Amino acid sequence: MSKPLNIGMIGYGFMGRAHSNAYRKVNNFFDLAYHPVLKAACARSADKARAFADQWGYESVETDWRKLLERKDIDAVDICVPNNLHSEIAHAAAAAGKMILCEKPLAMNGPEGLKMVQAVEKAKVANMVWYNYRRVPAVTFAKKLIDDGKLGRVFHYRANFLQDWTISPELPQGGTGLWRLDAAAAGSGVTGDLLAHCIDTAIWLNGHIANVNAMTETFVKERKHTGTGKVEKVGIDDACAFLCRFANGSLGLFESTRYARGHKALYTFEVNGEHASLKWDLHDLHRLQYFDNRDEGPLRGWRSIHVTDGDHPYMGKWWVPGLQIGYEHSFVHQVADFIEGITKDKPAMPDFRDALRTQHVCDAVLDSAKSGKWLDVPKA
Ligand SMILES: NC(=O)c1ccc[n+]([C@@H]2O[C@H](COP(=O)([O-])OP(=O)(O)OC[C@H]3O[C@@H](n4cnc5c(N)ncnc54)[C@H](O)[C@@H]3O)[C@@H](O)[C@H]2O)c1
C-alpha cells in the first residue's frame, strides 16, 4: 500500500497543468511507494485558484504561497511560477522543511542559484528541477547509447531551440503570459528559457561545458509594459547563438530564437562520435535517428528508431510495443523518478546542485555576449 505525498502547487499556468496531470497519472502506470495527493493549489486570485483546483482535483486553495508553506499537511511544494519567484519561495520552503520540485531555470543567475543550493542542502530537503526533456524516452535512450560507448569519442554536439511567437513589435512585455519578455521576471530571454533546456541535456549527455563564446540580439528594442502601461526598453535576449568547448574536447554549437518564422518549439540536437552519430527532434519526439559506421557496408545508413519497445527506457510501463507516448509523459516519468529517489534516498537528477551547472553556462553565455570574449564556465 503506497503512502500519501501531499503536494502544494504554486502557479496554475502551463507548468501547473503539466505537473498536475503527471501527479494524477503516475500511480496508474508506475508501482511506487508513494502516491501524490493534490492537497492545495495556490494562486493570487482566489477565483482562479478555485477554478484550477476544481479542474484538476485539488482539495483546497491558498492565495498566498507563505500560507501554503505554513501548512503541516503539505509535504512537497511545486514551484510553477515565473523565474524571479523561484528563489524566495525555495528558500522559505527549505526553511519550512518541505521537499521542493522547482521549475527551470533554477534561478535568475548563478549566485542566486548557489544560495538556493546551499539552502536545500543545509535543510536536507529533497529537491529537483524540472528539466523534463531528460525523460523523453528517446532522449534517455540517447544517454544510454552514449554511456555504453556506442558513439566512441565525441567530436561535435549541436542543438537548436527555435520559436516564432515574439516577432510582432505590438506584443507587450510583462504580465500574464508575457512575463517571459520582461527581464525583471524572466532574468533573460531565450537563454534562460529555451537554451537552458538544450544546455541541461547537453551536459547530461556530453559532460561539462568548459568555455563559451556567445552573441545575442534583441530585435525589438522597446515594447509597451503591461504593468506600467508605458513603452519601455526590452531587457531580454530575443536570440542567442554560442560556440563552446566541452571538457571532453568536443565542440558545441547552440542556437535559440523566438524569431524563426514557422517554428513553434523546434528543439533538436545531434551528437557526432567516432563510430556513430545520433539526432533527436522534439516534433518527432518518440524517434531517435542513429547512424553506425560499423554497420554492414551496403546497408549502412541512418536508422529511425521508433522508441516504443518494452526494453526502451520507461516504455515497458505504458501500452504495447509500437504505440508511442508524448510530451506530457516526460513529466510523469520525472514524478516517478522523484518518488523512487525519496524512497531509495538516491535523489532524482537534476537536483538543485546539478541544475546550477546549467545556470553557470547561461551566465557565461550572457556575459560573453556582452564582452565578445571566450569565458570559462565554473564547475557547480
Ligand atoms: N520544463 C519546461 O519545459 C517548462 C515549460 C514552460 C515553463 N517552464 C517554467 O515554468 C515556470 C512557469 O512557467 P509557465 O509557462 O507555467 O508560466 P505561466 O505564465 O503559464 O504560469 C505562471 C503562473 O504563475 C502564477 N503566479 C505569478 N506570480 C505568482 C505569485 N506571486 N503567487 C502565486 N502564483 C503566481 C500565475 O498566476 C500563473 O498561474 C517558469 O519558471 C518557466 O521557465 C518550464
Image (tube, helix red, strand yellow):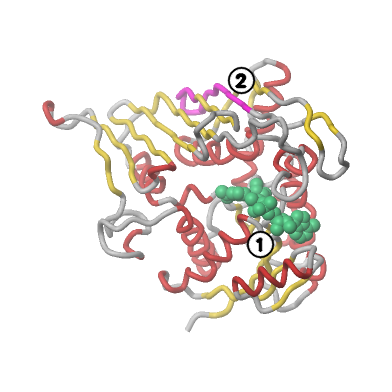
Q: Is residue 144 magenta?
A: no
Q: Percent from the top left, x then y, of residue 141?
A: 36, 47
Residue position marked by numbered label 1 in the rendering: 78
Quick check: 93 left or right of 321?
right
Q: Is residue 249 magenta?
A: yes
Please tell me the numbered disc located at residue 340.
Answer: none
Occupied quadrant, residue 97: bottom right
The residue located at (54%, 29%) in the rendering is 260
Q: Percent from the top left, x then y, of residue 29?
A: 40, 70
Q: Percent from the top left, x then y, of residue 136?
A: 43, 50
| Above or below, 305 relative to 12 | above
Q: Secondary structure at mark 2?
A: strand
Q: Which residues are magenta?
A: 239-252
The residue located at (61%, 26%) in the rendering is 240
Residue position marked by numbered label 2 in the rendering: 213
Q: Nearer the viewer, residue 311 or 115?
A: 311
Q: Secondary structure at mark 1?
A: strand
Quick check: 199 left or right of 226?
left
**Residue type, label 2:** Asn
Q: Percent from the top left, x then y, of residue 278?
A: 34, 34
| Above or below, 156 relative to 71 | above
The residue located at (72%, 68%) in the rendering is 49
Quick check: 17 left or right of 151?
right
Q: How many marks?
A: 2
Q: Nearer the viewer, residue 291 or 113?
A: 291
Mark 1 or 2, nearer chain start: 1
| Above or below, 288 relative to 222 | below
**Residue type, label 1:** Asp
**Label 1 crowd bin: few (<14), some (14–19), many (20+), radius 10 Å:** many
Quick check: 184 left or right of 28?
right
Judged by depth in the image, the label closer to the viewer, 1 or 2, is 1
Occupied quadrant, residue 67: bottom right
